[in-house]
Amino acid sequence: MIRNLRWWIGALLFASTVINYIDRQTLSVLAPALKEQYHWTNTDFATVLIAFRVVYTIMQSVSGRLLDRLGTRRGLSISVAFYSTVAACTAFAQGLGGFRIFRGLLGAGESAGWPGAAKAVSEWFPDRERAWAVALFDSGSSIGGAVAPFLVIFLFHTFGSWRPAFLITASLGFLWLIVWRKVYHTPETHPRITPEELDLIQSSRPPEVAVSPRPRVAVSQLLRFRQTWGIVVGRSLLDPYWFMMAEWFAIYLASKGFRMEESALGFWAPFMAADLGNFFGGGLSSYWIRRGWSVGKSRRTVVAIFGPAMLLLIPAAFASRYWLLVGLFAFATFCYAACSTIFISLPADVFQSSAVATVSGMSGTGAGIVTLVSTYLIGRVSDRLSFQPIIIVASIVPCLAALVMVTLVRPGKHTSADGILRNF
């Protein structure tokens, strides 16, 4: 028997998002070198990112439904095996067309990552710990993004080519898969869980879920609830900031005249700030729940504070000093991550387990659609004008996300309608 087994599961989910983001950020870190080698414009690079985003967006909802049907263990196994293979094959890309194809396939594989992790958290963690667990696995994206510049630049200089970087980083996913297959089972079927921990997990579930899980819920049913729209629209407005920072920050710093080696240090800071923001947002929410606040009130308050705080990114549009730019982006990313942890927690907070991955996938699809549009616009606007208007808009839109979430994701008269919504 393993004590606190749920936190070992949480650590494994954290490792998966670290690897996911190392694979994803390999291209962004190498972007300045690839642009020089292949003579790409920012618009050309945007089309590579869009190829990933189109497929990732479509497959988020598909993956969410498949995860609810296949189960967490099998669904994430297929996802990681597929995207690790694609990431390795990217080493053989030739030109713009090849990168578009491989990034599109990578998006298909990685689309199950966040819905799958959210579903695993809903299976393994009680209400008062769920935000901490989400912060743990979501912080993996920050750690992966922070590690990627140093690892990828080291591999690039060691081998004198960008191709080995894709092969070596992709191998991490296959190592993770071996451990995942050995360790992960649902609490009710896990051979190593203690009776005390199983009781703790089941005690936070509604009685009907603990006894006999409900069948899958139709998307048409979920769309009847304003809470679904609050989660989907709110996350759709919030997430594009993260992808702007993660995918364009190295090019943005290069546009300011900073070399790739200098940018690695600055590239690291916003990702580490996001890691702190994940835990701060999740921890603050959990603290208020322990003080007697409802789950919904604690989640809404975090978003209401940190969404508008991202307005402090606006001075970065006019700054030119390296560490001031990095510091402003780091603060905005800290605030983003605090909100992001809450949005990723919401499907498990608001809906029964049988609908969690589906709602999470729907919100990911919505975020992908908006990010797809913003990625194209970033490429066009930065080529024709500058990054200045992009940063101003990126600081304002999260305020709208906070307004939507605080307004719509509230208990209603029919919170337990059809047994789909939880009492949050």
Image (tube, grey):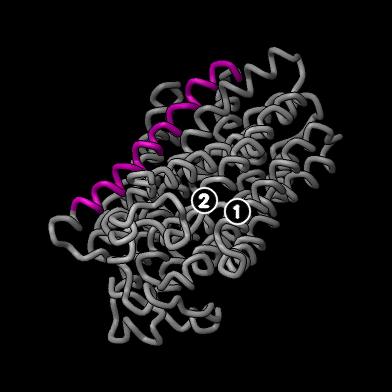
- What amino acid is labelled 2 in the image? Tyr
From the image, tell me which residue sits under label 2: 184
Q: Position of residue 81 (x, y in %)?
A: 69, 46
Disc nearer the start of the sequence (2/1): 1
Residue at 74% of width from left, 15% of height from top? 159
Between residues 345 and 78, which one lies in front from this camera angle?
A: 78
Q: Position of residue 294 (x, y in %)?
A: 21, 65
Q: Is residue 74 above or below residue 387?
A: below
From the image, tell me which residue sits under label 1: 76
Residue 259 is drawn in which quadrant? top right
In the rendered structure, the answer to whether residue 275 lies left or right of residue 83 reads left
Residue at 41% of width from left, 40% of height from top? 333
Visible residue check, residue 387: no
**Of the numbered discs in the image, which one, if any, rests on residue 175?**
none
Q: Are marks 2 and 1 in contact (CB under 8 Å)?
A: yes
Q: Position of residue 13 (x, y in %)?
A: 49, 46
Highlighted range, magenta = 260-287
Q: Is residue 281 above or below residue 66?
A: above
- What amino acid is labelled 1 in the image? Leu
